[in-house]
Amino acid sequence: MNTINKSIIAAIFLLSYVSIINSANILVLFTLASRSVHIWHTPLLTALANKGHNLTVISPDAQKTPVPNLTDLQVDGMYEGLTDQYAWEDLTESSTFYWISETFAYFENACSLVLKSDRIKQLLDYPPDFKFDLVLIEPVGSECLLGILPKFGNPPIVSVSSFALPHWVLEITGTSANPSYVPYAYLPHNDKMKFPERMYNSIAYLYSYVLYNYNYLPNMDREARYFFGSDIPSVYNTLKDTSITLSNYHPTLDTPLATTPNLIPIAAIQVKEPKPLPADIQTFLDEATEGAIYFSFGTNVRSDKLSLATRKAILEAFAELPQRVLWKFESDLPDAPKNVKISKWLPQNDILAHPNIKVFITHSGLHSTHETITRGVPVIGVPFMVDQHTNIKKLVKLGCGIQLEYKNIRKDTFLRALREIIGNPSYRENMKQLSARFQDNLNSPLETAVFWTEYVIRHKGAPHLQTGAKNLNFIQFYLLDIIAFLIITPTVLFSMIKSIFFRKKSKLKRKHN
C-alpha cells in the first residue's frame, strides 16, 4: 500500500473519529403551539441533526419529513387546547396589561399540557444511565419541564427564544432592560420616550416583572415539584443557569442596548434561499404585469374569520386595482374578484422573493416582519396582538410601511394605503436599505446559532460567558437597596445628631435658668 493511500485511510479514520466524539445527545423541550414558531425552530434542529448530533424533540409539531438523527416526540392536542380557543380578530383592542397576563397564562397552560402528556412519561422511562449533553428550551413556556433534567445529569441549557427581547430573555442573561429607554416588548414605543411614555413603559415593565417572578415562575415551580418530586432544584435557579440564549432579535431593527456575551442574535434564522414556486402560483405572479400583492395574516389569525363587513371592504378595494392579489384564505371565497387568487397555504418565503410582489399585507408578526425585510418588500401592517403593534411601528418609523387598525378597515382606507405604497417608490427604497443593513452580517443566523450551540457543548456549559447580574433581583440589579441605604443612613444620622444637639441645648438652657 503506497503512502498516499495510507494517508487517505488515516484521514478518513480521523474524520470519522472526530465525528463520533463531537456527536452529542440533545434534548429539545419546545411547548409553544404555533406553526410559525415551529418553522422558526426547524432550521436549527435540522442543522444540528445533519452535523451528526442526536436530537430528541418534544413539541406540539413534528417535522413534515423524517430527519436523520432527529426523533420527534409530538404532543398531540396542543392546538385544540391552546391557540384554537382564541378569536384573535376580536382581541385587537385588548390592553397591554391584558396581553401580559394572558401571555403568562398561555405559557402555563402549554407547559402543563406537555408535562401531563405521555411524552414526558416516555422520557422518564429512559434507562437510568442515559445522559443528554445539552438541552434546548424556549426561555418561557418550558419551565415546568426543567424538573426532568436531574434524571439526565443536569445538562447545560441553551435557550432559543422565538421572541425578540422580552424582559424574561434579558433577565436570564443578566442584560439590563432599563425602561427609561428600552420599550416593553408589547408597547409601540421607541428608545426616545417622553415622560408619559416612560411612565407607562415603566409600569408595564414592573407589572410584567412582578407577575413573572412572583406568580408565573412560582406556579411553574410548584407544578414541576408536584410532578417530579420536591427534591428537584428550583425552576428559578435552573433557569438562571442557562448557558446562552439565542434570541430572535436584530440590532438594526430592535432597540440598541448593552448586551452580555451570552445573548446571541439569530433573527431571521428561518429565511432560506427561495425555492421554485408551484406552477400555478409562478404563472399567476409572472403574468402580473402591473405587479402583485401578497396578503397573509400568518398561522394564528385566519382570514376567513374576519368580519363580513371587513372582508367585503377588502374585496371591493382589490376589485378596483390593476394588480393581482395572492391571499392566504383558509376556506372558499366565491365572491372573490378575478384578480384575486386564494389558497389555504402559501410558501411565503418564496413568494416574497418574486420580483413582481409590490406590497405585503401582513399581521406584522415577528417572523413575517423579518422575512419581508430580507426580501425588501414594503408592508401594510394590520396588527392584532402582543408585539405586532411594535413591529409595524418600527417599519412605519423607517418609512417602510403603513399601519392600519383592524377596526378602521374600510374600502377607502384600504385602497388609499395600497395605492400609496404601490405608487410611492420611497417605501420600497427605504425597505431595500433596511434589507441591506439587516443582512450585512459576518455569518448567517443559522451558522451563528449552530456555532454557539456547539460552543456550549465543547466548553461544558461555557460558564465563563455568564454574568453575575443574572443572580441579582430587581432591587439589587438597579441598586435600589444601595440608593435606599445612602438616603436613609444620612437621614437617620442627621436626625440622631439633631436630636442629641437639641437635647444638650435644652439642658444648657435649663442650667442657665
Image (cartoon, rainbow, N blue to C red):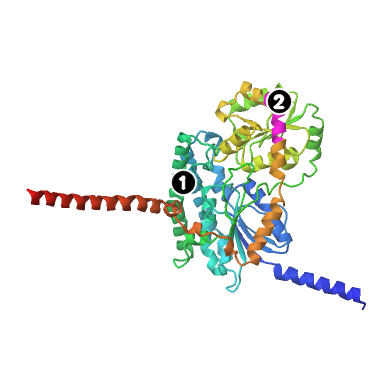
Residue 356 visible within the image:
yes
Question: Circle 1 sits on which residue?
Answer: 208
At x 34% / y 49%, what residue is drawn? 487
Residue located farthest toward the front when viewing the structure as drawn: 512
Residue located farthest toward the right when viewing the structure as drawn: 2
At x 71% / y 44%, what residue is drawn? 439
Q: Which corner quadrant of the image does residue 118 belong to?
A: bottom right
* Marks 2 and 1 close (CB-CB < 8 Å): no
On screen, 238 above or below 368? below
State the CA–CA distance, disc 2 to disc 1.
40 Å
Residue located farthest toward the bottom when viewing the structure as drawn: 1
Question: Circle 2 sits on which residue?
Answer: 424
How many C-alpha atoms fall within 10 Å of the one at disc 1: few (<14), some, or many (≥20)? many
9 and 39: which one is in front?
9
Looking at the picture, how far across and down is residue 48, in whole percent?
A: 70, 59
On screen, 346 above or below 446? above
What SS does tag 2 mark? loop
At x 53% / y 34%, what residue is drawn? 90
What SS does tag 1 mark? helix
Total labels: the figure holds: 2
90 and 417: which one is in front?
417
- Magenta includes 236? no
Front disc: 2 or 1: 2
Q: Amino acid at mark 2?
A: Asn
294 and 512: which one is in front?
512
Q: Amino acid at mark 1?
A: Ser
On screen, 128 above or below 205? below
Magenta stretch bounds: 418-431
Question: Could you tell me what secondary structure mostly forms the magenta stretch?
Answer: helix
Looking at the picture, how far across and down is residue 500, in whole percent?
A: 20, 53
Looking at the picture, how far across and down is residue 97, in whole percent?
A: 46, 40
